[in-house]
Every structure is written in C-alpha cells, then in structure tokens.
Amino acid sequence: MKIIDLRSDTVTLPTPRMRKAIFDAELGDDVFEEDPTVRRLENIAAEIMGKESALLVTSGTMGNLVSILTHCRRGDEVILGDLSHTFLNEVGGISALGGIHPHTVKNLEDGTMDLSEIESAIRSDNIHYPRTRLICIENTHNRCYGSPLSVKYTNEVCDLARKYNLKVHLDGARIFNAAVALNVDVKDLTRNVDSLSFCLSKGLSAPVGSVVCGTAEFIKEARRYRKMLGGGMRQAGIIAAAGIVALEDMIPRIKEDHDNARLLAEGISQIPELCIDLDKVKTNIVYFDLATDKISSEELLKRMNEKGIKFLSTGPNRFRMVTHYGITQEDIRITVETLKKVLIL
Ligand SMILES: *Cc1c(COP(=O)(O)O)cnc(C)c1O
C-alpha cells in the first residue's frame, strides 16, 4: 500500500541529485571552518537572503535558539507571538538554556501581531522590568494557517524595532513558501530583519539542516553559541551538499505544493462532515475541522491511517495536512476520495 504522508513537509526524502551530491561532497572539518561544501552552502544562503554571512545549524529549533542567544543576555526579554513555533514547540529552550524571558503578544489569524500591541509590550526603563531586546516574527506562520507575512508588515515591525533600538529575528522555517505565495524575491522579506533562520529540511526537501543568516559580526558570535549547544559539526559537508541542491533545485517547485494544498482544501470544502475556511489556505498548510459528532478525531485519524493516509490532529476536532515534494495531484485526489468514504457514517 502506498503511504500518503501529509503530517509535515519534514517527511520529504532527498532527491536523487541530493543523494549524488552527498556522495560526491568535498569535505573538511567545519569546526576549523575547513569544510568547502559547508562554506559554499553558507555563501549561497547569505547571497540569496541578502545578508553578509550565514551559518549551517542542525535544525530550525537550533537556528532560532542560536539566534536568540546571540541577540539577548540572561534576563532580557523577547517579544514573540503566542502561537509562534519558538514559544510553543521549541521546548522552552530560550528560557531553559538562555534565561531569556518570553513576552507573548497575541497572534492574529494571519500570523501577524498587532503593531500597537507589540509597541505596548516593549518595556520602558524601569528597575522592575526586564530589558526588551528582540522581536521575533514567523513567516510563513505555521499555526496561523501557514500564512505568509507581507513585505509591508515585515518592514513595519522592523521600523518599530528600530525606533526602540530593538533587533528583529525572523523564524523563516518556510520563508520560501512565503516568497512564492507573495510572488516576491525572498530578499524583500529578509532585507530589514537583523537575523533569520530557514529550514533546508522542510519544503526544500533536504534531509537535515537549517541556516542562520545575519551580519558577519552576528554570525561570528552565533558560531560560538552553536558550538556551546553541541552544534559544531565536523564533516558537515555531507549535510550541506544536499542543502545546496535544495537551494538550486527545489524553490521553483514549491508552487506545486501550494497548488496541491489549494486542490486539497477545495476537495475538503465539498465534504459536509468537514469544515474549512478556503480563504486561509495560502501556502502548503491546510487546517480543517471535524464538523460532526458521529465520529471522533481519533477514529477519523485511525481509519485514514488504515488506508495509508497520515495527517495530524492539532487540537480538539482540528486537523492539519501539509503538501510537499513527493505528494502528487493524484495523491490529493485519493486523499479527498478516502476522506469521503471514511466519513460515510
Ligand atoms: C519546523 C519549524 C521550526 C523548527 O524546525 P526543526 O528543524 O523541526 O527544529 C521552527 N519554526 C517553524 C515555524 C517551524 O515550522
């Protein structure tokens, strides 16, 4: 039985060209900064993002942690969305390992935070308060329907930060999905932020890795924190080789994932037992709700799983499906048909 795995775009497997690049990679010890393939990846990534410098890290979680540790000292405060991945899904690393205090601001359904609420969250100079150092934004916003944040909004956050002498970090795990959905150069979304981290291992389909980008000075310091966290890897060109292919080959095909997500969402909208807001589907993430009490979420997941279709439950009666490399239009058709069959109650 063919498995259609829609749990996440992290389940993607390396392409044949990635496997070949891994096999052929020229290697060295990257802790000595002597791995030519890692260097190449970092140079390419910095160039694409319009930043001076870049650093390969093990994961998106490490990318955000290294970046936030580099911006903040113990006891400093970071403003971030209450539905942000860093706040919800990164094991509280910034607090546990950095002593950095999270100050959450409500995420709106489009993944933004109200600018005036961000401004209100910025601390004044008062002996009772931690010092605000950093604002984090997430693009695309995972929990907010995979929404892309616009260039305009990004720049407004950066302007606000500058006014208060704060830094901005962009969690761009799926920044290319945002650029493709908005039809802009990715640089337009990264130009004014101080740092960003993006994943090679999601929509771009590389097996491992994320990249942090920023000024040369920032990346030099981030390299120390990466080492501190145990992320100094040796012949990491094995990983970087696939990352280079990811950046060379995989960006133009992201549109296919968005088209498939749209097709999936439209199919789901035709099923009376399910409920979806089609307007919210803008990238490769599709959230929908169970709109009947004749079947439980667990039972729906179980029955679909038995038919080889995997996806996640992300809340009471709420599900998430993510399209990615390896998921075809035909898979989407099968998924919708199977949902219909399983929901004949
Ligand atoms: C997946 C994800 C991360 C973390 O990436 P890992 O590589 O899984 O650690 C960070 N931010 C967002 C928005 C994500 O979706």
Image (spheres, grey):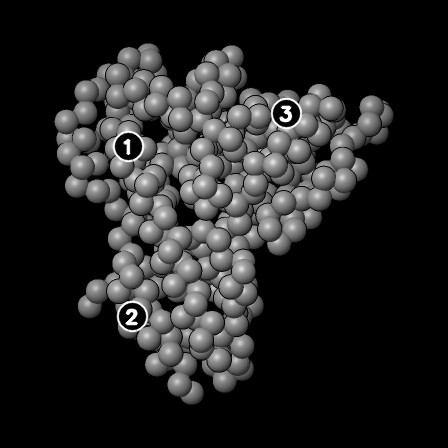
Looking at the rendered structure, the kind of residue marked 3 is Lys
On whether ligand 1 comes within 8 Å of the CB at mark 1, the answer is no
Indicate the quadrant where residue 338 lies. Answer: bottom left
Q: Amino acid at mark 1?
A: Glu
Residue at 40% of width from left, 70% of height from top? 267
The disc labelled 2 sits on which kind of residue?
Ile
Q: Position of residue 269 (x, y in %)?
A: 47, 72
Is 45 displayed left or right of 78 in the figure?
left
Secondary structure type for disc 2? helix
Q: Nearer the viewer, mark 1 or mark 3?
A: 1
State how far apart marks 2 and 3 are (Cα): 46 Å
Q: Earlier in the sequence, mark 2 or mark 3?
A: 3
Q: Which mark is residue 167?
A: 3
Q: Which residue is mark 2?
A: 334
Check the picture and name the quadrant holding the C terminus. Answer: bottom left
Element type at mark 1: helix
Q: Which circle, 2 or 3, is nearer the viewer?
A: 2
Quadrant in the picture for the N terminus: bottom left
